[in-house]
Image (tube, rainbow, N blue to C red):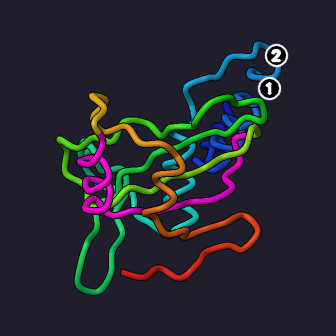
Amino acid sequence: MATSEPYSVDKLTAEARRLAAEYRRATGKTLPLSAEIAVNDAIRLLGLEQPIEPNPGCDALRRSENSVVRVQVKGRVLFGETKGTPRIGQLKLDQKWDETALVIMGEDYESQEIYCATRESIESVLAKKSSNKRGVMTLAQFKIIARREWAADRGLECHQQ
């Protein structure tokens, strides 16, 4: 009896991208896969670590010589016909994280850019909003306070802390 070789996470993610894009083209509906694809891409493209133990609100870790930054990852797929103002998923302010990485994907679910913003800058913007949708921010608002760390056409950009 032959044993099958286990699939790598990157191969499975590539297949999930393909299926999600095909499903959208066939049905006009989206599969809820963008969050998992975003976490995988953020870890791989930014050189982050996956936490050993599950930690609500923390999807990845950024280690340096003297610190560990807990990263909450959000993903947003931008479809060509999107109307209105794109928003990012609700930010979990009641959980422990230090920064948020936003992975922006095209309609093929391939990452185009990754932006990172500190918790302090996010909380400052959200505190100014009179909306009752606590933890919700537009894509444009996030990009204003964030730094671009990766782009498909440029690769990894310098990370400044």
Q: Which residue is mark 1?
A: 22
Counting from the top left corner in percent of width and height, residue 81 is at 77, 30
Q: Secondary structure at mark 2?
A: helix
Q: Please say whether residue 79 is one of the residues in the magenta stretch.
A: no
Which amino acid type corresponds to the residue marked 2 in the rendered image?
Answer: Ala
Q: Please say whether residue 116 is one of the residues in the magenta stretch.
A: yes
Closer-to-camera residue (74/128)? 128
| Segment tinted magenta in the rendering | 109-129
Q: What residue sits 49% from the left and 59% below the top?
A: 43
What is the residue that sits farthest to the bottom in this orientation?
Answer: 65
Q: Which mark is residue 26?
A: 2
Counting from the top left corner in percent of width and height, residue 121 is at 31, 62
Closer-to-camera residue (51/105)? 105
From this view, report whether residue 68 is shown above or below residue 93: below
Q: Secondary structure at mark 1?
A: helix
Which amino acid type corresponds to the residue marked 1 in the rendered image?
Answer: Glu
Cα separation between marks 2 and 1: 6 Å
Label 2, residues with CA under 10 Å away: few <14, some 14-19, many ≥20: few
Quarter of the figure with residue 28: top right
